[in-house]
Amino acid sequence: MATPRSTTTTACFFFLLCLYSSFYPSTSAPLFPKSALPTKSGYLPVNPATGSAIFYAFYEAQAPTSPLSKTPLLIWLQGGPGCSSMIGNLFELGPWRVVPSHNKNAHNLSLDPNPGPWNRLFGLLFLDNPIGTGFSIAATPQEIPRDQHSVAKHLFAAITGFTSLDPLFKDRPIYITGESYAGKYVPAIGYYILNKNPKLPVSQRVNLAGVAIGDGLTDPVTQVATHADSVYYSGLINERQKRELEEAQREAVEFVKIGNWSEATNARNKVLRMVENMTGLATLYDFTKKKPYQTSFATRFLNIPEVKRALGVNESMVFEECGDVVGEALHSDVMKSVKYMVELLVKKSKVLLYQGLYDLRDGVVSTEAWVKTMKWEGIEKFMTADRVIWEVNGEVAGYLQKWGSLTNVVVSGAGHLLPADQPLNSQAMIEDWVLEKGQFGRKQAGSSSKFRATL
Ligand SMILES: *[C@@H]1O[C@H](CO)[C@@H](O)[C@H](O)[C@H]1NC(C)=O
Ligand SMILES: *[C@@H]1O[C@H](CO)[C@@H](O)[C@H](O)[C@H]1NC(C)=O
Ligand SMILES: *[C@@H]1O[C@H](CO)[C@@H](O)[C@H](O)[C@H]1NC(C)=O
Ligand SMILES: *[C@@H]1O[C@H](CO)[C@@H](O)[C@H](O)[C@H]1NC(C)=O
């Protein structure tokens, strides 16, 4: 899907290149070196009749420990709704990150290797989901999904489209991962696959092996009711403010109860704005940060024509980190729960939940609140399992709780965009969970003497 260039553009491009190299003599480095390009990128049709398509960027495993045809494949979905997975790619867990670099080139941006990319041992596929997000194409606004079933249908088309691109992709175990509002997308596509597979010939099934949700919004009606406690017990507000927040939270819950979904979303947004106002924090994504996450470099990078060309994107597309059109389309979906989908996934697959310890939006307290209400025969055992200290290279990396197919990890030193804060530990987490190694092994955590129970 490379964009053909006219000769005039080519000439102009080279002319500019010459111009740049005369301004930035020996220091001028290519903005997007070949070594940093995705293994494959382009478009996966979701509706060939209209041209709507999901943009993807795929990075093959750097150091696979099995033949590629058997090497696990991770799929990453960003949240929002309407935020691009290219932020996950170039700011969080992809093999290269966009960093400011003065005078290296005209854009003052360059790509640095990520010390903890998630494609070390596994293939890694970023999807701009739903259509209308990032570089994905929504042929008409009406085609943009307004509920999770439609999101899942498109994702299923994209995933099967991807696995049929290369025989090497056909049978690889697939793990669907994602963050934040993808706490809804991830269960939705997982659930869709579980229901769809039995109706398909074996050759057309998706080889789902597990799902992982980071700092997710999954059961919003339960989660919205936790902010007051979470910030009060973090010492960020007083008791009177806690009561005010509880009142606002109750409003959100009431709107859910009467099924006024749009107002429920507005009420949740109000709760979050109140927390922002009361605490004055730079970002609720991480209460220790003095500045919001600096994702703007990646956004600027993705808007450079040379970069779009390299990725196979039409240069006329404007890249937005998070787009309002998709945000609007899914506005009434935000407060709808997908907990029942996780309940099926935990029975038929395996589930990892993980949260950054500093996240005040969809963090630890918010997650535990809904997890403990899950209808699943293992939930009691899970809730009473030891929460063990999780160590990476002899240091505390966080806390791990596991029973059967459900694992929850709290990651120290991290906020909402967790892989950006803890590249190496997040890599160790995803690798050990997929491969069931170390403290993520098949044995129940706490059953070996090497595990230390927390007090
Ligand atoms: C790029 O997008 C523009 C505007 O939508 C369109 O006119 C043009 O045909 C597209 N180019 C290609 C190669 O698809
Ligand atoms: C790059 O940095 C130089 C020197 O600091 C500055 O003059 C220039 O405007 C910057 N370019 C961009 C695109 O930000
Ligand atoms: C939701 O509540 C708002 C505010 O009370 C009201 O204006 C709106 O009509 C309600 N919508 C529905 C679908 O009930
Ligand atoms: C937050 O503060 C701003 C500025 O003081 C104010 O306009 C806004 O109404 C406040 N929002 C809430 C939800 O309290």
Image (spheres, grey):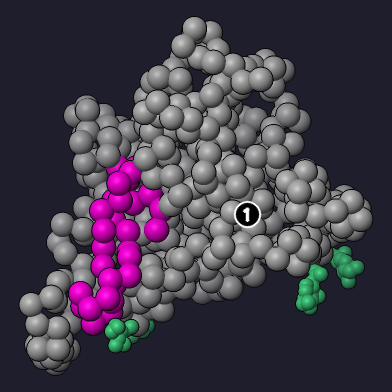
Residue 270, compared with residue 150, is above or below; it is: below
Q: For the residue carrying disc 1, how many other residues have a C-alpha within 10 Å: few (<14), some (14-19), or many (20+)?
A: many
Q: In the rendering, at what x and y percent does residue 83 appear? A: 51, 63
Q: Which residues are magenta?
A: 91-119
Query: Which residue lies at the image location 70% right of the left edge and 39% below the top edge?
Result: 365
Give above or below for 375 relative to 419: above
- In the figure, is residue 368 to the left or right of 327? right
Q: Residue at x 46, y 22 (%)?
A: 440
Q: Residue at x 32, y 70 (%)?
A: 100
Q: Quadrant of the N terminus?
A: bottom left
| Beta carbon of the mark 1 residue lies under 8 A of ligand 4 | no
Q: Nearer the viewer, residue 30 or 197?
A: 30
Residue at the image point whose x is 26% and y is 58% from the top: 112
Give the quarter of the figure containing the C terminus.
top right
Whole-percent x and y of residue 118?
A: 34, 42
Q: Quadrant of ligand 2?
A: bottom left
Q: Is residue 86 magenta?
A: no
Q: Is residue 148 visible?
A: no
Amino acid tagged 1: Phe
Q: Name which quarter of the figure residue 430 lies in.
A: top left
Residue receiving disc 1: 287
x, y percentage for residue 380?
A: 72, 17
Out of 83 and 439, give the one closest to the viewer. Answer: 439
Depicted 149 relative to depicted 404: above or below: below
